[in-house]
Image (tube, rainbow, N blue to C red):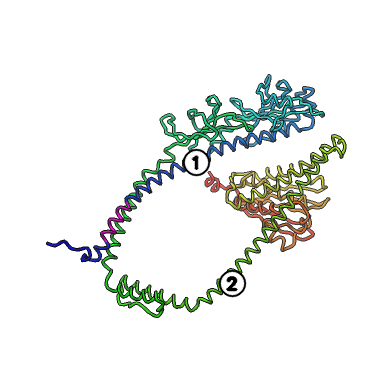
Amino acid sequence: MTRPRYRNLPIYAKILVPFAVLIIAWGGFGTAILVHGATSEARSRATAQLASAFDGARATLANEEQNLLQVVQLGSNTQGVAAALARGDGTLLRQLLEPIALNSERSDFRVTVRVIDRAGTVLFGLDTSVVPPKILHEPALTLAPILLAARGKTDALGDKFAALSPTDLFVAGPVRDAKGHGLGAVVVSENLAAIAARMGQAPDVRVVIFSLEGTQLTANGGPLPFRNATTNGVQVRVRVLGRTMETLYGPLDVRGERAAILGVGLTSQAVLGGIQGKSVLLTLLVGIAVLVALGIGLLTARAITKPVGALVGATRALAHGELHVRAPEGAKDEIGALAVSFNAMANELETQHRTLEKQVEERTAALRTANAQLVRASSAKTAFIAMMSHELRTPLNGIIGFADMLSDPMFGDHTPEETRDLASNIIASGRHLLGLINDLLDMAKIEAGKIEIRPVPTEVGGLVLEVENVLGALARAKNIEMTTDVDSDVPLAMADPARLRQVLFNLVSNAIKFTQEGGRITVDVVNLEQSVTISVSDTGPGLLPEEAERIFQPYERGSAGADDEGAGLGLSLARSLIEMQGGRIWVKSTPGKGSTFTVLIPSATIERLEVAG
């Protein structure tokens, strides 16, 4: 019996055997690679989640430090605080600082305000973390950085100091007399447990703050063992109460100095729990794919016959430029379909050969159009850069100019009133510059899809009255009559209070800006059952019809505001923020008579509350 030669085997065997070996080997190898990749991806995702939670916790502490610093700056700069501190008048200090402490409250930010003298003795203390706020009776604060602030000391970072105690985060700023001598300090603190609660808002994440010696100060979500961390952080796997956790440790800085160790933990089960099931399913799917591939290979091998030779001959002729050659289309099987496809390709090649010049002309025209669009885009970019350069330079020049007047002896000595006026101008210019930057950042976040909207049942009337209380003084300064009318049956609206307040501030501020002295502004809140409308009407110059159509586009301003400060982003931001909350905003305007901007927000019906919950 002679061994059959490979060349004499049936053609389907020649194709199928190597094909089967390759598919089976590649399938097994691929399955192992995919399972390993899935596991690696899960661990990488855990690392990314830990890093994100860790960075978020650090950012939360930095934000709280900045919030406390703002309260400190407001308190230490309040007129009369220095005199009351010099006299040790606790009653007057309470009258001056209690409104500041209460106005700084929000649902997740409650502070304790103290005033101390140079020795650290507490002259006044108020804790707003309890309801009602509680007057504190404490002997003294002994934290070294706080005493430095009370004595008017400064370092490379300025005269504001911060410190971390076992229970609280402190920020202190000096109170100085007219000659600049330190009389004491305003000290604002927040409980570490409240800060840790905001650090660990992500699900399945534990956040623990340790002292540098390893003592647990506070925790959110459960305990973690202490690990001393380098400046780059330490990632380890630990066992806590019988559970395996992926953890990340790193330093926690306060005012640029290491103050504590931060630990962030994530359960391994939350990261790797679904990997085993996915691995089994992946192996099963790859096995099915291998079997299907083998079946397809067998059918394909059996279908290959002599017509392949004719098809090869036609292909060679076509390769030599004989575009009129076609393959025979005798069979109706796969080879026949391949011949039909080949002939269709040959027809297409012949057609393309005849129409090549026309297609070149069309492509050239398309390139010219694209180049024109690029030129227009470049012009728009240049115009935007020029406008923003002007808008940013104006407040910066104001800040530099007023600062020169304060510091340059050639302007002579300034009275306290002149100094306050110059400082007020610097603050106003800085706030205008900050507003431009905030608008640009919000617009960038919206375009990138990274801005967060948290709709909750919101009392619209309260927001409107809050805006009226804040901006009413500006209206009265221009002798503008400002009225508010809120329907008695207005329901709660489903909105993000902070973003809705931002939109209302923008609309009312614009109305005050563009309304002449002696004019009138009306804010109406109307119940439409399924929604709530807020209308801001003014008696300003109004908008032209074409301006009303494009006033909500970025960087667009009406003709009445062409010479005013601003980048033209406010109304564009307002529209984006309202639409992200499921609402609408529009304007009706008559040139010379005024404008009415209307915001529609869905009401907080039971169905929406169930969905939001």
Looking at marks 1 and 2 on the same chain, the residue that comes earlier in the sequence is marked by: 1
Q: Is residue 24 magenta?
A: yes
- Distance from disc 1 to disc 2, alpha carbons, whole Å, reads 49 Å
Amino acid type shown at disc 1:
Gln
Q: Residues within 10 Å of mark 1 (few under 14, many from 20)?
A: some
The amino acid beneath tag 2 is Ala
Most foreground residue, 284 or 553: 284
Task: Please identify, in this view, whether the residue under mark 1 or under mark 2 is nearer the observer.
Answer: 2
Q: Is residue 146 above or below residue 246?
A: above
* Residue 105 counted in the magenta span: no
What residue is pinned by disc 1?
Answer: 49
Residue 192 screen position, x and y as percent? 59, 30
| Residue name at image x 68 percent, y 29 percent | 161
Whether residue 89 is visible here, answered yes or no, is: yes
For residue 6, what is the image quadrant?
A: bottom left
Q: Left or right: where does residue 150 sit relative to residue 580?
A: right
Q: Which residues are magenta?
A: 16-27
Q: What label does residue 365 carry, if any?
A: 2
Q: Going 31% across and 71% down the picture, which residue do you hit?
A: 335
Quick one: SS at disc 2? Answer: helix
> Is residue 582 visible to us here?
no
Q: Nearer the viewer, residue 242 or 154?
A: 154
Q: Residue furthest bottom?
A: 324
Looking at the magenta stretch, what is its main secondary structure?
Answer: helix
Classify 10 Å Cα crowding around label 2: few (below 14), some (14-19), many (20 and above): few
State which quadrant residue 344 falls in: bottom left
Q: Quadrant of the N terminus?
A: bottom left
Tell me where residue 179 sits by quadrant: top right
46 vs 366: above or below:
above
